[in-house]
Image: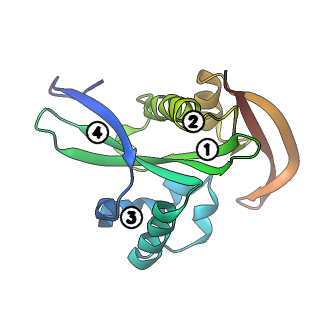
Amino acid sequence: MLKNKTNNLKTLILKELKLSDITPEYIKWLNNFETVKFTEQRYKKHTKKDVVNYVKKQIKSNNNFLYGIFLCDKKNKDKHIGNIKLGSIDFNHKSAYISYLIGNKSFLNFGIATWAISKVVTIAKKKFKLKKLFAGTYSINYASIKVLKKNNFKCEGILKSSIEFQKKRYDSMIYGLILR
């Protein structure tokens, strides 16, 4: 639960993203450098057509699951504020990657990414019976490292100088979580 400035309680929910969730605001997030600067999305100009095709592909996939992070108020009006993806799932090895994005900057630093990761960890364990999750991040993405550590992910690998960001080289960090 979050409290907004007027002290109304708001509830977070996670649900599989639908085509109807693709709004101009969502596309705007994907084209905002500050929002996507630590992702590979920063290299692409996103159009509605591209985003629709991507979401359709995730919906049809048997091993990729794209969830929207929504904030609901007491009027049950859902506000899409971010995404988290589970996949690709390797069903042979019972493992998967996760990736996440808080797109609406008004909701940064409220613990929402930490909450979303904990929910996806539960889905991975209960629904898909996975045993291992991974997440990658840039060594300078301190917020992402913090939320992974809050969810008990451990740094399992460092790919030295593998990322170029703003004309400098940085390490890529691989975090893992064993699911019990």
Which kind of residue does numbered mark 3 sit on? Lys
Q: Position of residue 123 (x, y in %)?
A: 51, 34
Q: Nearer the viewer, mark 4 or mark 3?
A: 4
Local crowd size for mark 3, using a 10 Å CA cut-off: few (<14), some (14–19), many (≥20): some
Q: Circle 3 is placed at which residue position?
A: 28
Q: Is 93 on the left or on the right of 124, as rendered?
A: right
Q: What residue appears at the point 53 percent right and 33 percent down from the top-left corner? A: 117
Q: Distance between the residues labelled 4 and 2?
A: 22 Å
Q: How far apart are marks 1 and 4 (CA)?
A: 21 Å
Residue 71, labelled with which disc?
Answer: 4
Q: Circle 1 is placed at which residue position?
A: 98
Q: What residue appears at the point 54 percent right and 45 percent down from the top-left corner? A: 100
Dot 2 and dot 1 residues touching (CB under 8 Å)? yes
Q: What residue appears at the point 86 percent right and 46 percent down from the top-left corner? A: 159
Q: Earlier in the sequence, mark 1 or mark 4?
A: 4
Q: Where is residue 97 in the image (x, y as percent from the top left)?
A: 66, 45
